[in-house]
Amino acid sequence: GPGGAAGALTAASPQDWEQRQEEDTLLIERILLLVRNVLHVPPDPAEEQGVDGDASVHDRVLWALHISGMDDLLKFLASAQSEQQWALHVLEIISLMFRDQSPEQLAALGQ
């Protein structure tokens, strides 16, 4: 039979592929829920009283998400026609990402 990667691809049955898609879907959902839950943690005023100019815990989480490429993944999930099932999760995450910003500030940035 065929060897190498082609052999591995043809060996998989349609059931294997469906199982794999289901596992991937569950994994994506768990990751989105984890990100949402981390962003959902309310600020702790005692923790946040650092030196002026210190990034808040929320800001540091946002920076970590940016460094990891999660923001690009969220943009992809939000805009890809084939990924509409994630729209509400993504909307909730984006809403939490901007929760500390005033609408006026955000509008001014878009000018």
Image (cartoon, helix red, strand yellow):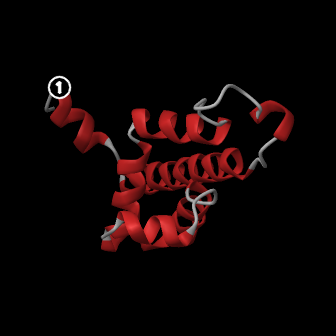
Residue that appears at 83% across and 40% down: 45
Among the 4 quarters of the image, the one containing residue 81: bottom left
Q: Is residue 91 left or right of residue 84?
A: right
Residue at x 53% of width, y 42% of height: 62
**In the image, what residue occupies the spot 78% across and 49% down?**
42
Q: Nearer the viewer, residue 41 or 53?
A: 53
Q: Position of residue 100 (x, y in %)?
A: 63, 56
Q: In which quadrant is the N terminus drawn?
A: top left
As helix, strand or loop, the secondary structure at mark 1 comes to helix
In the rendered structure, which amino acid carries the disc numbered 1? Gly
The number of numbered discs placed on residues in the rendered structure image is: 1
Position of 89 relative to 19 (above/below)? below
Q: Is 83 positioned to the left or the right of 24 in the image?
A: left
Image: 23 above or below 66 = below
Q: Quadrant of the C terminus?
A: bottom left
Percent across and percent down for residue 70 are 43, 44
Q: Which residue has dot 1 on it?
A: 4
- Whether residue 45 is visible here, answered yes or no, is yes
Seen at 42% across and 72% down, the residue is 107
Estimate the x, y position of residue 27 in percent, counting from the top left: 55, 47
Residue situated in front as seen by the camera: 95 or 88: 95
Q: Is residue 91 left or right of residue 33?
A: left
Residue found farthest to the right? 46
Residue most extreme to the front: 52
Q: Is residue 94 above or below residue 38?
A: below
